[in-house]
Amino acid sequence: MKTSKLYNFKEMNSYQFIAVVGLVMTLVAHAILEIANKHIASFNALYACWLGVFIIGAIINFNTKPDDHGHHHHHH
């Protein structure tokens, strides 16, 4: 199991990358609202969503073998 797939942008898949970008954007928006003294409860749900997307992406990434050459074989 390569843990570098969790933090190295080159080894992340698109799900993980989107999740990281989403988390950063949520964080920035959250910080702006904190400064503006506006409290929105739904931000916690947003963090959970992005984290979920990242975890799903990581699972897909760990299950993708390098010798697949981009072809995803779905085993049911």
Image (spheres, rainbow, N blue to C red):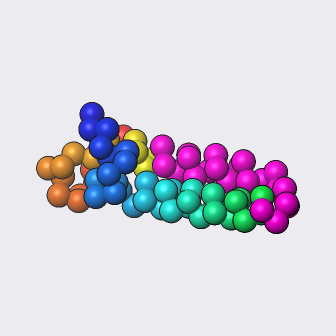
Q: Residue furthest front?
A: 35
Q: Residue furthest right?
A: 38
Q: Is residue 21 left or right of residue 6?
A: right
The residue sitting at 64% across, 46% down in the picture is 48
Q: Residue furthest left?
A: 67
24 versus 55 height, above or below? below
The residue sitting at 72% across, 65% down in the picture is 32
The residue sitting at 85% across, 60% down in the picture is 37
Where residue 1 sits, quadrant-wise, is top left
Q: Is residue 16 magenta?
A: no
Q: Is residue 52 magenta?
A: yes
Residue 6 in picture, x, y percent from top left:
37, 45
The residue sitting at 21% across, 45% down in the picture is 65
Between residues 76 and 54, which one lies in front from this camera angle?
54
| Image: magenta residue range | 35-55
Q: Is residue 19 visible?
A: yes
Residue 30 in picture, x, y percent from top left:
71, 59
59 versus 50 height, above or below? above
Residue 2 in picture, x, y percent from top left:
27, 38
Q: Is residue 67 left or right of residue 9?
A: left
Where residue 9 sits, quadrant-wise, is bottom left
Between residues 51 and 40, which one lies in front from this camera angle?
40
Q: Is residue 66 left or right of residue 35?
A: left
Residue 73 in picture, x, y percent from top left:
27, 50
Between residues 61 and 46, which one lies in front from this camera angle?
46
- Magenta region, main secondary structure: helix
Q: Is residue 74 visible?
A: no
Q: Is residue 41 left or right of residue 65?
A: right
Quarter holding the C terminus is top left
Between residues 34 and 26, which one lies in front from this camera angle?
34
